[in-house]
């Protein structure tokens, strides 16, 4: 049995809704996040299933995209990024027959970033994002943390997950195959193989990169900048790449949903804000492997673990944005005086929630500096500040600022 089928996927009702009123629905997300398992369930409802990972189907799609699509009434097409030329053929078919739910596509790359694709299905396609498993899916706790906090409700961690138990979850990440593997050694072996396979195969599908052998070293260099502002020239210098090439490679990894550039939150009146984006890895398990961080290391030195933990929180919040009732953006705050907030969540009305992430079980006044600064700058837009820490109590700290257990992210 595919391990991802063992867990509920909170995106499924969104796919159902979209298929009722939209001709083409694209389920995007990284490879092995569980997309195929999910869309196969829709294929059982009468949609013809095709995967471009099959060599014969791939050949047919490349040689005669129009002919392939012409013969389909309603279909699931898996890994569509392997033949982007199918999309104009799908557009033609949909323009002739606008029934909703005709095509359910999956893609392991952000198709909208491909110049040949960007406008071909505008107004005809809805894109939904399936990321690796969230902790709330693993624990089958369907409440959405972000919707809850904007409604004034911090979820409770019951029971809280602390210390080494928390670190094991953080370092495991959310890919179904990694979650299923019983030992750290086997999870690390999977993560290495996964990144190698992506670099050797999927990068070729979406980008013309000459020196693929540079990419593993470059990924490791990027891992050292996770959760920090990225100086492209400096990072590239470690592996012999210029700043322009670094920016291009990062864009490719973003298209493949491995990384996300996290922009700074700013109001117009802020003159001294730092504009550089931060880089976040979407899966903390892959980041931990690239940084060689294990639970044993965490017990001795929490330095590198802090960056992995921040990526874990960022990834969990990003997963919640994909299934939330409102639209949210994830940003961060840092100014020239070095006041920082790890994640700033902004809703469609411009209201803010600030998130600060701490590896320790104790909270000090100094830990609240960034949240208090953000609250003062945002004024009425500031809804709440939450300091997520490795403790078990949810406590008010004044001015709509709270301390809450990290495991409240999958609370009830």
Image (cartoon, grey):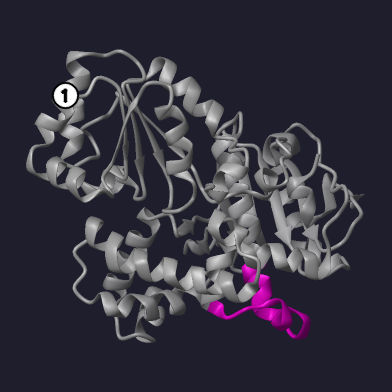
- The x and y percentages for residue 137 are 66, 43
> Residue at (69%, 44%) from the top-left corner?
136
| Residue 287 occupies quadrant | bottom right
**Residue 299 falls inside the magenta stretch:** yes
Q: Is residue 228 visible?
A: no
Q: Around disc 1, counting alpha carbons within 10 Å, would you say few (fewer than 14), some (14 to 19), or many (20 or more)?
A: few
For the residue pair 357 and 268, the one nearer the viewer reads as 357
For the residue pair 272 and 317, the one nearer the viewer reads as 317
For the residue pair 312 and 236, the one nearer the viewer reads as 312
* Residue at the spot of label 1: 71
In this image, 5 relative to 102: left or right?
right
**Residue 54 falls inside the magenta stretch:** no
In this image, 264 relative to 377: left or right?
left
- The x and y percentages for residue 131 are 51, 48
* Above or below, 64 relative to 220: above
Q: Is residue 167 visible?
A: yes
* Extreme-front residue of the structure: 1
Q: Magenta region: which residues?
A: 291-309
| Residue 144 occupies quadrant | top right
Task: Please state, as top left, top right, bottom left or bottom right, where the C terminus lies in the image.
Answer: top right
Tell me which secondary structure the magenta stretch mostly adopts: helix
* Extreme-left residue of the structure: 63
- The x and y percentages for residue 401 are 82, 49
* Above or below, 217 relative to 272: below
In this image, 66 relative to 285: left or right?
left
């Amino acid at each position: 049995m595919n391990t991802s089928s063992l867990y509920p996927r909170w995106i499924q009702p969104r796919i159902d809704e979209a298929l009722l009123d939209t001709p083409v629905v694209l389920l995007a997300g990284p490879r092995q996040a569980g997309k195929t398992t999910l869309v196969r369930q829709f294929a059982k409802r009468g949609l013809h299933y095709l995967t471009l990972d099959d060599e014969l189907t791939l050949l047919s799609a490349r040689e005669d995209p129009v002919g392939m699509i012409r013969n389909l009434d309603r279909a699931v097409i898996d890994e569509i990024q392997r033949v982007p030329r199918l999309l104009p053929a799908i557009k033609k078919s949909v323009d002739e027959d606008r029934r909703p739910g005709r095509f359910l596509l999956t893609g392991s790359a952000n198709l909208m970033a491909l110049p040949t694709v960007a406008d071909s299905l505008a107004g005809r396609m809805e894109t939904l994002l399936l990321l690796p498993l969230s902790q709330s899916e693993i624990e089958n706790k369907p409440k959405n943390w972000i919707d809850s906090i904007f409604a004034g409700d911090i979820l409770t961690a019951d029971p809280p997950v602390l210390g080494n138990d928390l670190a094991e979850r953080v370092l495991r990440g959310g890919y179904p195959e990694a979650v299923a593997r019983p030992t750290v050694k086997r999870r690390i072996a999977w993560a290495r193989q996964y990144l190698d396979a992506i670099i050797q195969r999927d990068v070729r599908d979406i980008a013309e990169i000459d020196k693929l052998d540079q990419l593993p070293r470059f990924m490791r260099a990027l891992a050292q900048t996770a959760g920090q502002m990225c100086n492209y020239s400096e990072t590239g210098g470690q592996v012999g790449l210029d700043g322009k090439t670094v920016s291009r490679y990062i864009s490719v990894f973003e298209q493949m949903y491995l990384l996300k550039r996290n922009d700074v939150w700013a109001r117009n009146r802020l003159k001294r804000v730092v504009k550089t984006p931060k880089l976040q890895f979407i899966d903390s398990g892959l980041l931990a492997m690239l940084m060689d961080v294990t639970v044993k290391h965490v017990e001795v030195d929490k330095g590198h673990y802090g960056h992995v933990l921040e990526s874990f929180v960022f990834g969990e919040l990003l997963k919640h944005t994909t299934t939330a009732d409102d639209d949210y953006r994830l940003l961060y705050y840092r100014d020239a005086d070095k006041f920082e907030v790890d994640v700033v969540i902004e809703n469609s009305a411009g209201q803010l929630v600030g998130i600060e992430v701490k590896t320790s079980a104790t909270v000090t006044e100094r830990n609240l500096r960034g949240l208090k600064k953000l609250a003062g700058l945002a004024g009425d837009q500031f809804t709440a500040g939450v300091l997520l820490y490795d403790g078990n109590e949810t406590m008010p700290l004044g001015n709509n600022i709270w301390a809450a257990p990290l495991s409240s992210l999958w609370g009830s």
